[in-house]
Amino acid sequence: MEIDILKKAGLTESQAKGYMALIENGEKSPAELSGLISETRTNTYAIVDKLEKLGLAKKKDNTNKAIYIAAHPSAIETLAEKRRKIVTRNEQEIVRNLSTLIDIYYEHNESPGIRTLQGVDGIKKAYKDILNENKDNYLLRTTADTPSLGDEFMQDFIKKRVQLGINTYALTHDTEIARQHIRDNKDEEWLFDRHTLPNNTYTAPVEINVYGDKVALIAFGETQMATIINSPAIAEAMKQVLMLVGDLIGKNDPTKKSNLLNS
């Protein structure tokens, strides 16, 4: 049972047997220890060297030959904690870079790739993907109630989008917030080319973003999630649909000049 516990802390079976042998038999040289754990002397030297680096064994000073003693078992807890931090750090690194690996995968596969991201955190990841793609965005905004992503998050998103030079060609409803942004010249400052839809013409609780070879369908309301489709054909189709809508708006209202078709 002790060996299994030590293995769960990250030791190999040979290292676990070496540590237990030092605990049960006291100080030993690698040569003496090799007979106790049925390992060659060469392997045993490597084992005690590793145990020393892990803080589980100590080399006695003032001796003519290498003698090792076991460290207190509390060192196992310290070792387990270090390994937990490493695993957590690696997991975070994987999550941060997973989208890059997925993009590479889909570049070399014909079928469209689909990622589903759940909850508010998933929606935030979809917005971050727009930044990572660094391509102009074609947007259809919903009037449905949206979950709070936090003013800080959205301000940071807009700031980074502008810094990257990402233009947004948007179809939105004629809301008071939209009018305020137009009056304050925020649209121009934020590289936001807005075209307003007749009120209540698009009420589905899903925002559509088309950028590069991707389409992000961001669902609000009761279902909070984002689906990212990586497909050049689908992205081009959705882009053309939004461009056509924008062009129709421009034709129906001579005061508006649609840039969607010219972008």
Image (cartoon, rainbow, N blue to C red):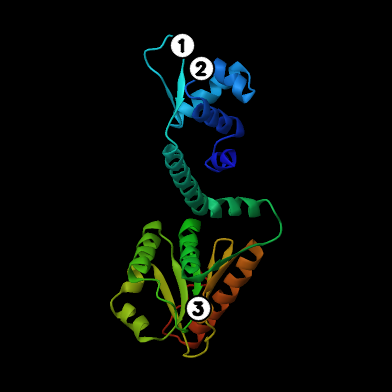
| Res. 29 mark | 2
In the figure, residue 145 lies in which quadrant? bottom left
Residue at the spot of label 3: 220
Rendered view: 116 above or below 180: above
Residue lying furthest top:
64
Place of residue 6 in the rendered image (x, y in percent of width and height, measured from the top left): 54, 39
The residue shown at (64%, 51%) is 105
Rendered view: 77 above or below 123: above
**Amino acid residing under circle 1:** Lys
Rendered view: 169 above or below 54: below
Whichever of labels 3 and 2 marks the residue nearer the N terminus, that label is 2
The residue shown at (51%, 79%) is 246
Under circle 2, the secondary element is: loop
Under circle 1, the secondary element is: loop
In the figure, residue 226 lies in which quadrant? bottom right
Residue at the spot of label 1: 65
